Amino acid sequence: MRSFDYGVAQRQISDRVTPGILKQIMSAPGRLLTTNPVSGKQQSYLFWLRSPTFKYSDKLDCYVDDISALDPDIPGPHPPPTKKAEIFNLDDYIDVDNRAVNTPTKFYRQPLKDLVNYLIAGYDDEMSKIRVIYRWITGQPIDQLPLEKKPAKSHVLFELWRIKNEEKSYAELVSKLCRYADIPCVIIHGTVKGSTYEVGDRIDEVKHFGEWNAVLVDGHWRFINSYWGTVTHDVINPNGDDVIKNGDLPFRLYYLCDDNYFLTDPDQFGTTHLPMCQKWQLRKDPLMQTEFETMAYVKDGYFNLHVQTLTHTQCIIVSDSNQVEIKFTIPQQSSLNIDFKCRLFLLEDGVEKRKDRYVFMHRTNNNNTLTVKIRPPERHVFRFELFGKDVTIKGDIYDYDWIVIYKLIFK
């Protein structure tokens, strides 16, 4: 991340901050918390001009737009004492989700505050408020907003338009929604193993930059990434096209959400997200960047199916022979319900060639170990991908999910 001299910036703009700007900042609902007030999409002189009151909080290890108005009872970052599964059951929030996905389209042309008031009406608990916000934003057809005109700045649609045009991020909108709902929320900046990452890459703070959120639930911070949680699996479209003209929504677009990125446990989240502020890993034993770079590139299926690496814990495997053998443990109580698939790609001059026939998978007699043997016909660089699926889970949208990806180098 390129450096920014906050002191110099403040001195340069101090005589340009009008009472109107300050009044607008000070009257904003809740407090804006961020690990870096001028990074990512916000990294601009203009953003600093509009946010001259940011001060660093040692307790929270982040910046606050008005530290004097910060609730002193908000705790600093710390590992949560319980797992997500202990505090959240999706079946208990079906009605909350239904409210979010069936929000009347009239709110697109109303202020953000009115939308939040509708979403959280009748909810006294923090979990329901956070859930309805997450489910609403992950259900928005942001990629399918070909608006011919810039929406009114006071409208919800304007916030979605800004994301579509890369003026703002999902994390920033989540922060705004949470502030209106009186939910402490931090915008966290760091690096992610996302769409720009290839297994084995050295982490680059620009190429792999990402933003996500931590929200306070019952006194403990939990991660959410609404951008990664947005899934465009299916579209119900009675009109036969995907166009929203001039802000009109003549039909309803349904997006699904990926709950792997809602209140994600730190151990799972830390395999793909590395915050610039170490405390916001929320781990008892924080990772160093070198560990983050070299660790096995495990994916959601690794955690959902409770698979564990038994032999290779780093993402790059180097072999001096013509064979690599990778072993995984499988929970014995569910091992017979898990089906595995794999893919092997030869990587050469930017071209990927499928070589699956050189992979052999088998399980031990008690079915608690999966062994993968890879014997390529040539010494080269390969990418190996392992997928898995619990065959007892039914549903049109449930399918094989990535478990782990390795880079293989045969010398």
Image (cartoon, helix red, strand yellow):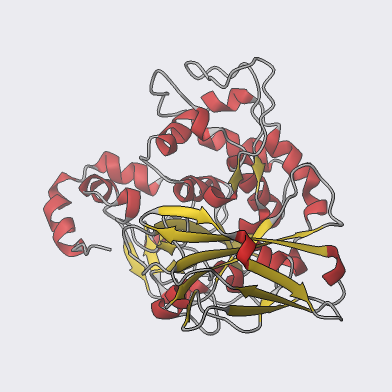
Instruction: Please provide percent x and percent y for residue 382.
Output: 48, 66
Farthest front residue? 377
Instruction: Please provide percent x and percent y for residue 13.
Output: 15, 50
Closest to the observer, 319 or 206: 319
Query: Which quadrant of the figure has residue 259?
Result: bottom right
Residue 64 falls left or right of residue 250? left
Q: Quadrant of the N terminus?
A: bottom left
Instruction: Please provide percent x and percent y for residue 341.
Output: 70, 60
Residue 39 falls left or right of residue 12? right
**Residue in the image at 73% along x and 43% along y:** 97
Closest to the observer, 151 or 379: 379
User: Looking at the image, how many numbered discs can be counted on the residues?
Assistant: 0
Q: Is residue 233 above or below residue 253?
A: below
Q: Is residue 261 above or below residue 166?
A: below
Query: Which quadrant of the figure has residue 405?
Result: bottom right
**Residue in the image at 14% along x and 61% along y:** 8
Residue 43 falls left or right of residue 179? left
Instruction: Please provide percent x and percent y for residue 68.
Output: 38, 63
Answer whether residue 76 is visible to the viewer in this image: no
Q: Quadrant of the C terminus?
A: bottom left
Answer whether residue 15 is visible to the viewer in this image: yes
Closest to the observer, 147 or 153: 147
Closest to the observer, 366 or 281: 366
**Residue in the image at 83% along x and 57% along y:** 391
**Residue in the image at 23% along x and 62% along y:** 2
